[in-house]
Amino acid sequence: MKKSMLAVALALGLGVVVAPAAARADVTCSIVEIEASSGSAPSIDPELKALERKFKRPPLSSWNVFKKLGGASLTLAPQQAGATTLVHGKLGLLLRDVNERPGKKPRLGLGITIDDTNGKRVVDIKVGVDAGDYVIPARPLPGDKGHLVAVTCK
Amino acid sequence: MLAADGEAPAADLGPEARPTVAAVRELGELVRGSLELSADDAEPRLAGLWDLIERRLDVAEAPAAPAPVVAPAAPSLGARIWTWLTGHRSHIATGLVSAGAVAGLAMALGPAPREKVVVKTVQVPAVAPAVMTGSPPEVESMELIGGSGTVFTIGDDDGDGDAAVIWVEPDEADPTEGI
């Protein structure tokens, strides 16, 4: 009887200890679709202020006009996939895992797929990024333009 | 012995006891004579003793001279206070008990003491905020259909996070295709 009570108390204690670590289930990912081009007058969409510094670094600095085409937000649990429609295709996002590290940013395992407007898969990548970091697949579009999709998860 | 003391008639004595009785009587005469001589010698001293006893008896019978009257010393201030305190100790004890009871009631029924808030300005040394370190993005696998890719990592400029740019280059059309 005493052993069973002790086991229950131990299980409850472990549950209390483990619960905070397991509490981080959902991750919110922000997806921003950007059209990049080169123009005589540099221009950056005010809604892309957070990425302004990135646009001035190679290889993105090969363009000087950045226009936001759209955006979406997906809230995912580990091993959960989501998708959003883009102006130039479709994006699929899979949150593979979340690795909490003491003293460091959580490490996120992401799977990103991009299909073009014809439904043809053009990008299929698996990356590991810190929470708050960006993953930006960039591919050319006709007319010497670029199609960027900035994905960041927290 | 009874015959020597004269308590028994001498006629009852046997011839052998007569010398013994005579000797006892002679010895008695000698002892008495010696004692009388000693009494005579001690008479002057006994007479002086009697005079002494008589004088003492006379002194005892005479009335004693009255003792000189001495005025009592005035008690000191401390002694007077102590005397007053000891004389009123019941009143003092009653007062102390009553004061204690009133104080206890006041503490039990009175309002709770108000918290005193003291605002102090303290110079706190500047402490650098804890910065969570991170790792750059890492591409684990990349599959680009109809093209090739290059991964560029743009570092964290001012806390806006790292960025991994996957630069996709479409494959050029094979000039020999269709030949």
Image (cartoon, rainbow, N blue to C red):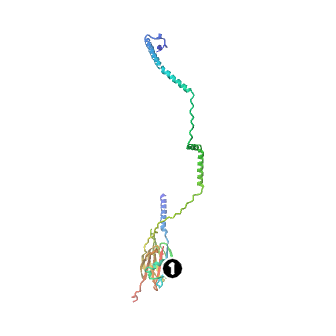
Residue B10 point in image, percent of width and height: 47, 11
Q: Nearer the viewer, residue B38 or B165?
A: B38
Quarter of the image holding residue A123?
bottom left
Q: Residue at x 53, y 24 (%)?
A: B55
| Chain letter, disc 1 residue | A
Residue B50 point in image, percent of width and height: 51, 22
Q: Residue at x 60, y 51 (%)?
A: B102
Identify the secondary structure beneath mark 1.
helix
Q: How many residues crowd around disc 1 within 10 Å: few (fewer than 14), some, or many (20 or more)?
A: few
Q: Is residue A89 above or below residue B75?
A: below
Q: Nearer the viewer, residue A72 or B110?
A: B110
**How many numbered discs sit on the rendered protein?**
1
The quadrant of the rendering that contains the C terminus of chain B is bottom left
Q: Nearer the viewer, residue A127 or B98?
A: B98
Residue B11 point in image, percent of width and height: 47, 10
The amino acid beneath tag 1 is Pro
Q: Nearer the viewer, residue B142 or B90?
A: B90
* In the displayed structure image, the side of residue B112 where residue A76 appears, left or right: left
Q: Residue at x 48, y 58 (%)?
A: A2
Residue placed under numbered mark 1 in the picture: A46
Q: Is residue B73 above or below residue B159?
A: above
Q: Residue furthest bottom?
A: B179
Residue B130 point in image, percent of width and height: 46, 68
